[in-house]
Image (tube, helix red, strand yellow):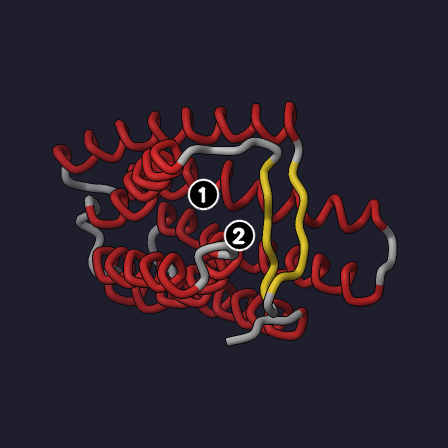
Amino acid sequence: MCFSAEASFTASIALAAISFASYRRINKPKQLLLLGVPIGFAVQQFLEGLVWLAFKYNFNPVLNKLAIYGFLFFAFIFWPVYIPLVLTKVERVIKYRKILTGLTVLGGLVAVCFLIILIARGATAEIANCHVLYRLGIIFSYAQLLLVGLVYLLVTVGAMLSSSLRGMRVLGIATLSSFIIAQYFYYLTAVSVWCFFAALLSLLIYWIIGLNRA
């Protein structure tokens, strides 16, 4: 499977459209927070489309850097905080809300760590085998990568699986499955590939909002 600027921009447009359609289904104010998921992925995929264009046409290195850091901001800083935070806000079961609150705090710590790495060590990107390969300016050992990956999954996928919101656990299982696929088949470029899969899966927010209208 090869990705491209066209694939990223198409995903971005589809996500923007589903965000608007989802907005029209909302009948509870708190559910507006769920729209941040498809909207956020729409912006993230648009940024990756710019990364593709910058490499393909070799233009504007400043724009390329902004697009790279923008994409990584969503991947490593925004999602670990936003996903458990939103699910905490819409959660009605107290015991699950407590779990989600803890995951939000943990997600905040993950985001701060990645923010420090991005500021202190920077990041780069390149095209590798029809995918974007992002590199942080720090080398992790295998054990460190495993730990970081498990904590990241805990605060994002774990939050979805800890939510009592109807349909959210289905999205969590699908997102976990897409992570496994990305890691197995696209290990080096898993960040880009998994974000693309997760972006497509966020289209399910339209369905989830519909399930929770009552």
Return the residue nearer the eye: 64 or 91.
64
Residue type at mark 2: give it: Gly
The answer, for residue 213, to whether it is visible in the render is no
> How many numbered badges does the structure rendering display?
2
Nearer the observer, disc 2 or disc 1? 1
Instruction: Where is residue 95? Give x, y as percent.
Output: 12, 33
Binning the other alpha carbons within 10 Å of mark 1 as few (below 14), some (14 to 19) or many (20 upward) gives: many
Q: Which residue is pictured at 19% across the width and 44% down the height?
A: 162
Image marks 2 and 1: residues in contact by CB distance under 8 Å: yes
**Which residue does the image show at 62% across and 62% down from the upper left?**
128
Camera-side residue of 166 and 188: 188
Task: Provide the secondary structure element on which disc 1 rests.
Answer: helix
Front residue of 170 and 140: 140
- Location of mark 1 (residue): 79
* Quarter of the image with the C terminus in it: bottom left
Q: Position of residue 138 (x, y in %)?
A: 56, 31
